[in-house]
Image (cartoon, rainbow, N blue to C red):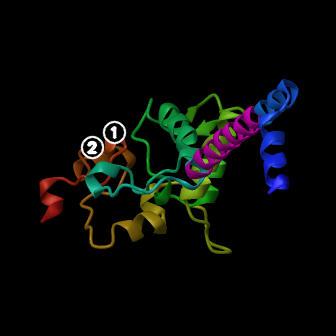
Amino acid sequence: MANLIKRRVRHQRVSPRHRRQRQGKSVSLLVLVLVWSLAMGWLLSLASNVQGATPTPTTANEIGTVDVVPAKHKLGQELYLENCSKCHIALPPEVLPSQTWKNLLQDSQHYGATLKPLVDPPRILVWRYLSTFSRPLFKEEPIPYRVRKSRFFQALHPKVEFSTPAQINSCVSCHPSAKDFNFRRLSAEMKE
């Protein structure tokens, strides 16, 4: 019993210095937990942004372009549209092969017009966008420079009968929103 009383007395007689040390340790522990929690929250938010948050369902009308463009290619797409839409309807990268796009980006001669070619880094961003959404040709396959000669364009239009050879500016006859880079919306005649 005497030992029990001595222990209680010892706990009651804690010096002010020891009390401050205990309080300092508990404050340090609280700060450490707070910093750790903030760091983990920040890392989790970064991870969710990189992997993409849970995608919300979209309809074909909301997408507009043929493929949904990830954030890392958005700037390349914007630069592509900004540069190509000045003179004609910008085509989806899917309709021409990668080799055609590569040659078009490197050549200042563009279908009879002399253009100021894109320089790096915008050219690299546009190329990454175009090469991601276009497909390579087979070996020994000729590189098409006209839409109507591209097997990719033909594959995207399997049942379409063209009264005249397909040209870039004739896209709007079937795709009324082509000028807005929306090739999903079709004219009433094409929906039937």
**Which quarter shows the N terminus?**
bottom right
Q: Is residue 143 left or right of residue 5?
A: left
Point out the residue furthest to the front here.
2
Distance of label 1 from label 2 (alpha carbons): 5 Å
Q: How many marks?
A: 2
- Where is residue 29, by image quadrant? top right
Determine the main secondary structure of the stretch shown in magenta. Answer: helix
**Which quarter shows the C terminus?**
bottom left
Residue 123 is situated, as x and y percent measured from the top left of the image, at 66, 38
Residue 161 is situated, as x and y percent measured from the top left of the image, at 25, 67
Task: Say above or below: 69 vs 108.
Answer: below
Point out the residue furthest to the top here.
16
Residue 52 is situated, as x and y percent measured from the top left of the image, at 52, 53
Residue 177 marker: 2
Viewer-closest of 22 and 14: 14
Label 2 sits on a secondary structure element that is loop
- Residue at 71 percent across and 32 percent down: it is 119
Q: Specify whether residue 175 is in view.
A: yes
**Label 1 sits on what residue type?**
Asp
Task: Say above or below: 130 vs 122.
Answer: below
- Which residues fall within the magenta stretch? 26-48
Q: Residue under label 1, please give it.
A: 180
